[in-house]
Amino acid sequence: MKNATIWISTITILLLLSGCLYPESELEKNQTPNEDQLQMVQSAVEQYKESTGGLVPIQTKPSDTPIFQKYLIDFTALKENNIITEIPGNAFENGGVYQYTLITPDEDPQVKLIDLQITEALRNVNVQLNIYREKHLYPPFGKEIEEKIFTVDYGELGLDEPPTIRSPYSNNNLPIVMDVNGELFIDYRIDLNQALSEFEHDFEEGDDIRYLLAENTPFVPAYSFPYTIRDGEPVFSPDL
């Protein structure tokens, strides 16, 4: 929990600092996903992989980093190898609000985005949670949704309503949930349920169905528990 909180806070500070360097028109441009920029980075990753004998340009992360935040693209490596000359304008490294990341890097590396506006929204709730934890032994557990997964008792945090985050997929308000250690996660079941109906798939119980979102959209479901499918519905599966 502590490491995750520090990472979210650091990203937020850097976003605020980088935002001061760009005029309003540039900031607006840098806050939208761009298919051309995604494809440019995808091509660069493939070129890098070919030229290095199978390596991919990723930053070094601890082995226990959550899967969708683990393989962030190293733009410095791409520039040093003369594969790109400019970092995409909407990338965090260039003042934008997206981190470029890879899924399935060993098999078929695909370039995707982490929406850092989600990071900021989650950080805001974490601030209230940390204030609470300084005064109380246990996190503010609400209702147990499934074993070891809880809603957040928003009243204990001084909030007027249950905390939610705007989905990068559907603009739905997604609930924030909590594990037994008091770490916060985003509940993507609304979007996963829609994706199960919208996209063709062969997922079975025991599979991590988050890849249904990651493979069919520009975004990865960051800060999420694993989910599987049971009786046609998405369910939490933290042990995957």
Image (cartoon, helix red, strand yellow):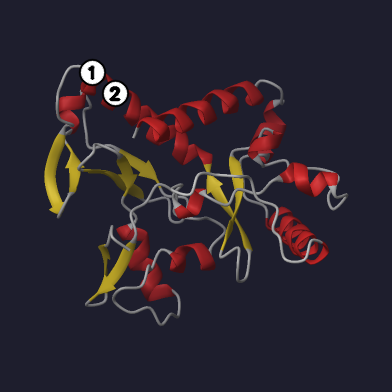
Q: Is residue 119 above or below residue 40?
A: above
Q: Nearer the viewer, residue 206 or 155?
A: 206
Q: Is residue 62 left or right of residue 134?
A: right
Quarter of the image with the C terminus in it: bottom left
Identify the image quadrant of residue 128: top left
Q: Is residue 21 above or below residue 240?
A: above
Task: Tell me which residue sits at (78%, 59%) in the image.
Answer: 48
Q: Is residue 112 visible?
A: yes
Residue 190 locus on image (x, y percent): 31, 59
Dot 1 surroundings within 10 Å: few (below 14), some, or many (20 or more)?
Answer: few
Identify the disc placed on residue 134. 1
The local secondary structure at tag 2 comes to helix
The local secondary structure at tag 1 comes to loop
How many dots with numbers?
2
Q: Is residue 39 left or right of residue 176?
A: right
Q: Amino acid at mark 1?
A: Glu
Could you give the CA–CA distance between mark 1 and mark 2, rounded to whole angstroms?
6 Å
Identify the disc placed on residue 130. 2
Q: Nearer the viewer, residue 93 or 109?
A: 109
Task: Tell me which residue sits at (23%, 27%) in the image.
Answer: 159
- Taking the view exactly as shown, the residue that stands out farthest to the left is 143
Q: Is residue 88 visible?
A: no
Quarter of the image with the N terminus in it: top left
Question: Circles 1 and 2: CB distance less than 8 Å?
Answer: yes
Residue 12 locus on image (x, y percent): 51, 28
